Amino acid sequence: MVTFRLPFTRSRQRSPRPGSVNVNTALIHPRNRADSSSRNYPASLALGGSEDDSANFTKRDNSGGLSTSTFRITIPSNVRPGEEFQASAGERIVRVCCPLGAYPGERLQITVSLNGDGTISDRDSMPLQDLPQDQDSENVTRIPDQHLLPGEQSAYSVQIPEGVMEGQRFSIRINGQPLSVTCPNMSRPGMTVKIVPPSTLQSSATATRPLVGRQNKTRRFEVTVPKGVKPGKPFTLIASGVRILVTCPINASIGQRIQFDLPLELVSAANNGPKSALSQIKLSYDKDGWTRTVRASDVTFQWTRFDERGNVEQQPRFDIDRSAYVLKLDFLNDAPIRHGRVSLVTPEEGVVDSNIKRADGSELACYSDINNAQMKNYGDKIKWFQDICAELVVGSWANCIKINVRRDCLVSDSMHAVMSLSREELRKRWRFEFTGEAGLDVGGLKKEWFELVSKELFDPDMGIWQSSTTNQMCMQINPASAICCPEDHLLCFRFLGRVMGKAMFDRELVKGHMVNHLYKHLLGWPVMFNDLKDLDEVYFKSLKQMSAMGADDLQYVDMDFTATEDLLGMVQTVDLIPGGASTMVTEDNLPEYMEACLRYRLLGQYEAQLNELLLGFYDVLPEPLLTIFDFQELELLMCGLPKIEMNDWMVHTEYSGEYNRLGPNHEVCVWFWEIVSDYDQEMKARLLQFITGTSGVPANGFSSLQGNDGNILRFTIEGVSLDMCVYPRSHTCFNRIDLPLYETRDELEDKLRVAVTMAATGFDLE
C-alpha cells in the first residue's frame, strides 16, 4: 500500500464581529507547542480577516505599541469542535473557535495580538516554549527506517482506540505534540493505520487505509517505478497474480524502488485461485479497454484504461473513441431518507468500496471475496449474490413487515407503505395482503405485487418512463416526467428504485427493461460516446458526422453549446455549459462540445430523476455487492430469463445477403439454429441481448419485434464473407446479425460463443 505524506493545513479566517479580537489557540490538554517558524497553526482563529484569508500572519517586532497577551481558557461543556464560543481575555471578551480534535473541558492557550489603541493586529502567535514535553502515545509505534518508503523521514503505526469508528477523529501524541487523526474508511477499533507526519506537526491529519486486513496482516511488495510514469501518476503491476493500481509517490522518480503493502487476504486469494484468474478478471470486466483494478492505496475498485504498451492511459481532453465517464452518487447525509447528488466523473474518481458490511457495521465480505465472485459464471454469481443478501436480512418472519394495499389504489398505497420504511426495514421480510381478499401470502402475493407495481410504474401512460427511440422494448426516463406527474414524479423514482432493489434482494422480478446505459449507471460502469447509439441512433450519427467536420464546415453549421428539447409540445433551449447560447462550436472546442452532448444525453436530461432512482436502489443493496455483475447480467437478474420459443423465433426470422436465396436451408443457417437450440436459457437470452440490445421478448412473440423507428422489424440473419468480419457482428438498431460463411459447424459454434459472451466487455472482435 502506497502511503503519502500528510498535507499541511491552513486555518481560515472569519468575518469580524463586534468586540472580537484576533486570537490564536493551542491545546494545553493534550499539550501543544505552536511552531512560529512554519507559520501553519494547529487551530488559528483569526476572526478579523476575510473569508478567503489564511492564518499566515506577518511576523513583527514588539514595537509601535504592539503587544501580545497569552491566556488560558477552558472549553465550555456545550461546545463541539468547529463551534465558536466567548471567553474572557483580561478585560476583553473574545470569540474563540474550538479546534478540531479538542473537546469540552480541555484547556486552550490563546495568544491575543493587539495594537496600542486596542484595535486588532496581524501579530503572529508566539512560540509557547513553556509547555512541557510528553512522550508518544501508548498506541503509537515508530516504524523502523528499513521499512520506510523512499523519501520518508519518519512514519508511525497507530492503533485505532476503542469506540472510534470510520470518519471519526481521535487524538495521539508524537514527540510531545498532539495530532488529531481521522479514522479512515473500512477500519474499526483495534486496527492499525499508518501515518507519515509532515516536518512540522499540525493539529489534524487523515490516516491512510488500515495497514492490515481482517487478519491484521499485510505483505510488503517492492517495485521499480517504470519508464514514462511521472510522480503522482498511477501505474499498474501484477502482485501475486492480482492486477494492482499504484500511484507513484510525489517524491519518487523513474527507476527508483518503492514499497507498498497488500492485505494477506488479497494475496492469498490470488495465490489459491486458478492460474488464469487475472485473465478471467480482465476479460470479464473489460469495457472498451477499461478494466477494473484494485487500487493499492486504499484497496478500492477503480476503472483503468491501458495503452498499447500496457501503461495507464491518461486522457487530458475528451476523445469520442477513448474517453469514458462513470456515474457517481455522493451521499449528502445519513438520515432515514438520504439525500445525494449524482454526477459523471472520470473513471479514476468513480471508485467503489471493496467490502460489504452488516447492519451492525461488521464486515460480511471483503475485496478478496468480491474479487473471487467476479470470476464466477453467471449461475454461481447469482448464488453468491443471494447468499450475501440472505446474510443481510434483518430479523425473522416473526417481526416481518406487513403491507396492506388496495388493488384499485395499488401504486399510491404501495408507495405510501414502502416510503415510510427505514433502510433497515427494507431488508426485513415482507408479507403482502390485498384489502378485501382472503389470500395468505406464502410467496405468491409478493411475486404478484412486484410484477403489478413495476409494470404500472414502467407503463408509458403513467408518464415517468417512455419507450426508447432506438429499441421499443426498452424504457428510458421521460425528461418531461415533472409535467406528467407534477406532484410526485421524483418520489415515484425513489419508490421504483426501492422496488427494484428489493426485488433483487428477495429474488423477485420486475416487469420493465431499461436502456443499456441505465444498467451501467446502476453498476457504476463506464459509459462512452458509443452509448449514445443505443439511446438515439439518429442523434449519434449526426454527432459523428459533425466530429469529422473541418473549421469551414463548422462555421457554416452555425452551432452553439445548447440543446433543444420538445417536452410534450413545450419547446425549450437548454445550455449545455454555462453561457452555452453565446458559445459557438469551433474546431478548437469541438471535443468539449461532444463531451457536453454526452453528459447531457446520458445524465443531464433527467439528472434529478436518476438521482432519486439510485438513492432508492442503494437504500436496499450496497453498491460493492453489485460489482460482481456486468450490465447484461444485471438485466437478466432483474428481469429474469425470457421465455424464448425456438419455433416462434425461427418462423419469424428473415434472411439476407449470402443467405437470401436458400434462407433457413443454407448449411450455415442450419448449423446456427442447431447451436442455438442446444443453448440453455441463459445463453439464448445473451444471444438475444447481443442482437437486439435487450433480453426482452415482445408480448406477442417475435412477430412483434420492432426496430428503432417503432415499426415491425423482424430478426434477420445476413450472410457475409469472412473477409468482412471474422466473428458474428450485431446491429441492435435493426435486429440483425451478420453471420460469416464459416466452413465448419465447430468454427461457427466457437466464434458465436465468443461474440455473445464478450458482448458486455466491448472486446474488439475484429
Image: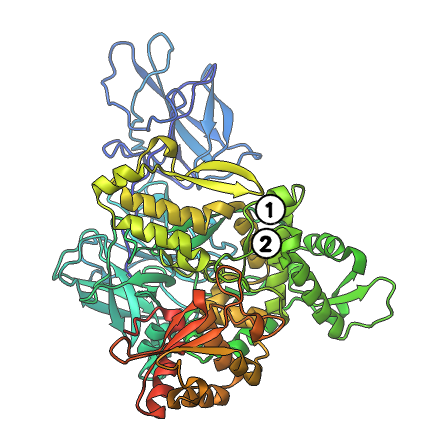
Question: In this orientation, does residue 359 appear?
Answer: yes
Q: SS for tag 2?
A: strand
Residue underneath mark 1: 481
Question: In this orientation, does residue 628 appear?
Answer: no
Q: Is residue 443 above or below residue 415?
A: below
Give the mark, 1 or 2, whose residue is nearer the N terminus: 2
Disc 1 crowd rating (10 Å Cα; few below 14, some 14-19, many 20+) is: many
Query: Count of labels shown?
Result: 2
Q: Residue at x 58, y 49 (%)?
A: 338
Q: Position of residue 272 (x, y in %)?
A: 36, 83
Q: Residue at x 55, y 70 (%)?
A: 696
Pointers 1 and 2 in contact (C-beta within 8 Å):
yes
Residue underneath mark 2: 465
Q: Is residue 741 above or below residue 691?
A: below
Q: Is residue 351 left or right of residue 457?
A: left
Q: In which quadrant will I find the C terminus? A: bottom left
Amino acid found under the numbered disc labelled 1: Ser
Amino acid found under the numbered disc labelled 2: Trp
Q: Residue at x 39, y 83 (%)?
A: 661
Q: Position of residue 298 (x, y in %)?
A: 36, 60
Q: Is residue 758 above or below residue 230?
A: below
Q: SS for tag 1?
A: helix
